[in-house]
Image (tube, helix red, strand yellow):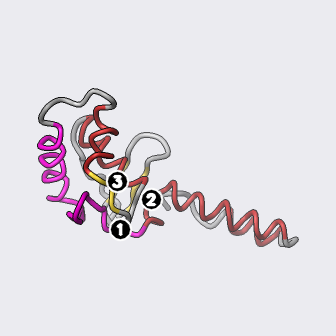
Amino acid sequence: MRFGILGPLDVRTDRGEQLAVGGPRPRTLLTILLVNAGRVVSVEQLIDGQYGEDPPAGAANAIQAQVSRLRKSLPVELDGVGYRLAIDPLDVDVHRFRQLAGDGRRLLASGGFREARAAARGGGPLA
């Protein structure tokens, strides 16, 4: 799968088909998990990301219900105190961009101008 968060949330299958995520709350939850791809995000962090400083009384249950819906089509795992999106971070455009930018900086610093240019053309975030 490929995920885009540099702009509107975009979720694509391996065949390039767009996957519908749902409304604002599940999209926010998924974005938080994507920013932390491969790492456990605590329920408290998800509640804070969804509701801010004044969460409703049933916020933890709401998070659990949203995760349950996401798990139908995405590899979201329960891991002790929170949830983890079990994907390669480089399948997320922001992480891929960071890697390409770092590679380009290192190549430029070592005088590899052509290599840096080739690396920059190595594919867009969702390519």
Nearer-N-terminus badge (2/1)? 1
Is the residue under label 1 in contact with that under label 2 (CB below 8 Å)? yes
Q: Mark 3 sits on what residue?
A: 33
Q: Magenta stretch?
A: 59-88
Q: Please, what secondary structure does the residue beneath circle 1 have?
A: loop
Quadrant where the N terminus lies? bottom left
Q: Which of the pair 20/27 is nearer the observer? A: 27
- Relative image position of residue 37 (x, y in whole percent): 39, 61
Q: Quadrant of residue 71?
A: bottom left
- Relative image position of residue 14 (x, y in whole percent): 33, 67
Q: Please, what secondary structure does the residue beneath circle 2 have?
A: loop
Which label lies toward us, 2 or 3? Answer: 3
Q: Mark 1 sits on what residue?
A: 87
- Relative image position of residue 16 (x, y in whole percent): 35, 60
Q: Which of the pair 45/1 is nearer the observer? A: 45
Nearer-N-terminus badge (2/3)? 3
Amino acid at dot 3: Leu
Picture mark count? 3
Q: Mark 2 sits on what residue?
A: 92
Amino acid at dot 2: Val
Q: Residues within 10 Å of mark 1 (few under 14, many from 20)?
A: some
